[in-house]
Amino acid sequence: MKAPHILLVLLFSLLLSLIHNSEHSLYIFRHIGVKDGLTDHYVQSVFEIPDGWMGVRTTVLLSLYDGNQFTSFPYNSRSRYPIAYHHAVPEQYIDVHNRLWMKERGGLHVFDLTTERYIANVDSLLQDFGSVSYTHLTLPTIYSV
């Protein structure tokens, strides 16, 4: 009779041990925010950039996070290109030339990830794509982020 009780106690101990160890993850998660250098509380989207950085779009800027700190690039009204895009959720794409295309309500920003500058003359880029109607631009998924 003692053997089944000992076996039951051992199984119960093993179960508790497994539950306790499952609480410790292999990954460490923490919230990243203003205390880490993010300058705006209202985040519209978060995405990974191919070089491993994390991109964060807020209402007023693009922030790039390298794992330690944010580098912020405020939107420039000269770099905003008007388009017919009325979705509440912004979209972003990265093309083969390492440019980040960011669609938002009524506008488009193009950011060169290599030079870390916004591109003001979006018309020339669109002509390269062969786009005819710039005001009703629908970007193809170049590389969806």
Image: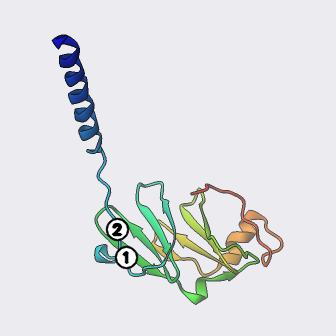
Q: Are marks 2 and 1 in contact (CB under 8 Å)?
A: yes
Task: Pinpoint residue 69: horizontal percent, then vertical percent.
Answer: 30, 69
Q: Which label sits on residue 38?
A: 1
2 or 1: mark nearer the eye: 2
Q: In this view, does 43 lie above or below 141?
A: below
| Callout 1 amino acid | Leu
Residue found at the far bottom of this picture = 77
The quarter of the image holding the C terminus is bottom right
Image quadrant in which the N terminus is located: top left
Q: Is mark 1 on a helix, strand or loop?
A: loop
Number of marks in the rendered image: 2
Please tell me which residue lies in front, 123 or 55.
Answer: 55
Circle 2: element type: loop
- Using residue 39 as the reference point, say whether residue 20 is left or right of it: left
- Color theme of the render: rainbow
Identified at 64% across, 80% down, the residue is: 121
**Callout 2 amino acid:** Ile
Q: How far apart are marks 2 and 1 (CA)?
A: 8 Å
Crowd band around label 1 with a 10 angstrom C-alpha radius: few (<14), some (14–19), many (20+): many
Residue 107's tag is none
On the picture, is 94 further left or further right than 25?
right
Q: Which of 14 and 60 is in front in this view?
A: 14
Q: Which dot marks residue 32?
A: 2
